[in-house]
Structures are given as C-alpha cells and as structure tokens.
Image (cartoon, rainbow, N blue to C red):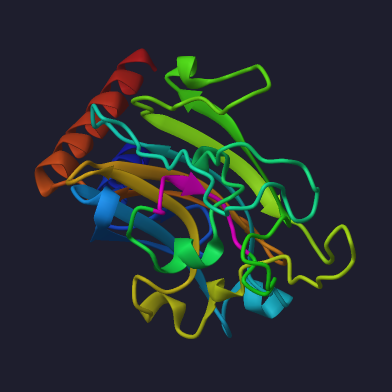
Amino acid sequence: MRMGMRVKSILAAAVVSGMMTMSASAAFTVTSVRSLGTNANSGNDIIKFYAKYDSVASPEAVAGALGLQGVKATLTTTDSTGFIFRMVNLDGSPQDPDTLVVEPNDADVLATQTPKTTARSSVSSAIGSTIRVWDFNNNAALPGDAAFNAASVTPSQNTNPNPGPAPAYVNLKSFRVEGVLLNPQSADHTQQRAGTDTNAKVANAALAAPDTGAIWAIAVVKHGAPVTADYILTPDQGGVTTGSISDPAPEPATIGLLSVGAIGVLARRRRKA
C-alpha cells in the first residue's frame, strides 16, 4: 500500500512540474512571461520570471513582510547558443553610486548593474540575462543597495578568476546567482530603502496576471529556446519558497516519460529492498 502511495505521489509531482512551479512552501506564486525581443534583441525571446504572495492571507503578509528580499536561483537552457548577455556599460556612469568603485562593462550574470526600470519594462537591446531583486523604493536609477554574486557558471571556462574585464560568457548554458537586497540606508545615508521589492505583495496573488509581482530573473535566449529556473525565494519576513519552473512547460508526452521514469526508479528500489 505504501508503495502505491509513493508511486502516486511521484507521478503527481512529475505532472505538476510540467505545468506550474513546484514549491516546498506555496507562499510565493511563481510565473513566467515570454516576449519577443526588439532592436538588437530581435530574434531572441525574453523570459521574465515573477514572484508574488497574497497581500492578505499568505504567511508572509501575516508576518508583516514588505516584499521579496533575497534569491538563490539557477537558470539553465539546453539551446546550443546558450544565454545572451549585455556586455556594455548600461548605466553610463563611471562608478557605483554607493561604493564609488569604478565599474567595468556590466555583466548581467553578476546582476549588479541592470537598471531596474529597464528590467521591468524593456524587451529591447538593453536587456540581458540576469538574476537579482530590485528595490523600487530606492529612487536611484541604478541602486547600489544589493549584494548579488555569480555562484557558478557552466561551462566553467567562462569564469575569469583575475581582476579585469568580465568574461564574455560564450555559449553559457547555466548560471547561478545568490544574493539579497540590503537596507535601510545607502553608504552616504542619503537614501532610505525598503530593502525589498514591494511589487511581490499582490492582492489575490494566485489569480493575478502572470506579469505581476517581483521580477527575480530574466532569461534572454534564441527564439523558442527552453529555459528552466530553479529557485529559493526569500521575503523580508516569513519563510522561503523553493521550486522549479520551465518555460515553455514540458509537452504532455514529456510528462508521460517523466512518469514512466519515476515508476522505473521505484521498481529498481523495490528490487534492491
């Protein structure tokens, strides 16, 4: 009886993973929206990943959360071209507004220099693949209020361990970024910050439009290329949400193969037992 229950559980998980986010705790509703790129991104798709929690009934709302604060996420594609980045100085500024450190060309995989207004609205040349959280309550166009770092990139030859220009990220198939928004003030104490993306707090979040909530990742890929995002999302109050979402979702035939594979794994385990 227990064996049958385990099969049903795994089959259910396999089916659900193809249609919606799998989550250990369902506080955040996670969605993705794919759009056609424009200008230099013509021929590319831009996939924006959103996270939202209910402004009234969710554990985060009850705990008093203001929004999304941290993210640990991996974007992966099987497309031969890999992810597309913007290796340009997007902000046009010679130095970070908080640290006063002179910045090289921006590498979106590091998620430190993408203008938040651009990230939220653009599908043009200025958008590249990135993972991060933005504080829209900070009036600076490019907030220096975040600590996000690339934890890993694949293939590894795209990693540059030495100081200097960022690597070109050629044919990058997977990258992971981890970090949080900081609060409450800038280094010069002139800007008060929320330290969260308050767009994550949405009325009736489960029924809200897919393109609402906090944007926590952007994938720029060749048209039609699949992307999977594995994530851990953290509000400033309340628990974390973990899960995985694919865009496009796997076809029903693929879900069937996943189900068959799950049965095979269970059968091998049973024989070993």
**In terms of image quadrants, where is residue 137?**
bottom right
Residue 197, compared with residue 203, is above or below; it is above
Q: Residue 198, located in which quarter of the rendered image?
A: bottom right
Residue drawn where x is 33% and y is 37% of the image: 3
45 or 127, which lies in front? 127
Percent coordinates x, y for residue 48 in the rendering: 38, 58
66 displayed left or right of 41: right
Instruction: Return the residue nearer the eye: 103 or 154.
Output: 103
The residue stretch that appears in magenta: 126-134
Q: Can you see residue 249?
A: no
Q: Residue furthest right?
A: 189
Specify the quadrant that holds the C terminus. top left
Total residue callouts: 0
**Camera-nearest residue between 269 and 190:** 190
Q: Is residue 188 visible?
A: yes
What secondary structure characterizes most of the magenta part?
loop
Q: Residue furthest left?
A: 253
Q: Is residue 268 above or below residue 33?
A: above
Residue 204 lies within the magenta run: no
Report the side of 226 relative to 218 (left or right): left
Residue 266 place in picture, x, y as percent? 30, 28
Q: Specify whether 153 is left or right of 2.
A: right
212 to 127, vertically: above or below: below
| In this picture, residue 63 sits left or right of residue 13 | right
Q: Nearer the viewer, residue 247 or 19?
A: 247
Question: Residue 62: x, y in percent?
Answer: 68, 79
Residue lying at 31% horizontally and 48% vertically, measured from the top left: 246
At 63% from the left and 70% from the top, the residue drawn is 67
**What percent of the width, then of the height, locates residue 104?**
62, 36
Position of the N terminus, as image quadrant, is top left
Q: Residue at x 41, y 40 (%)?
A: 85
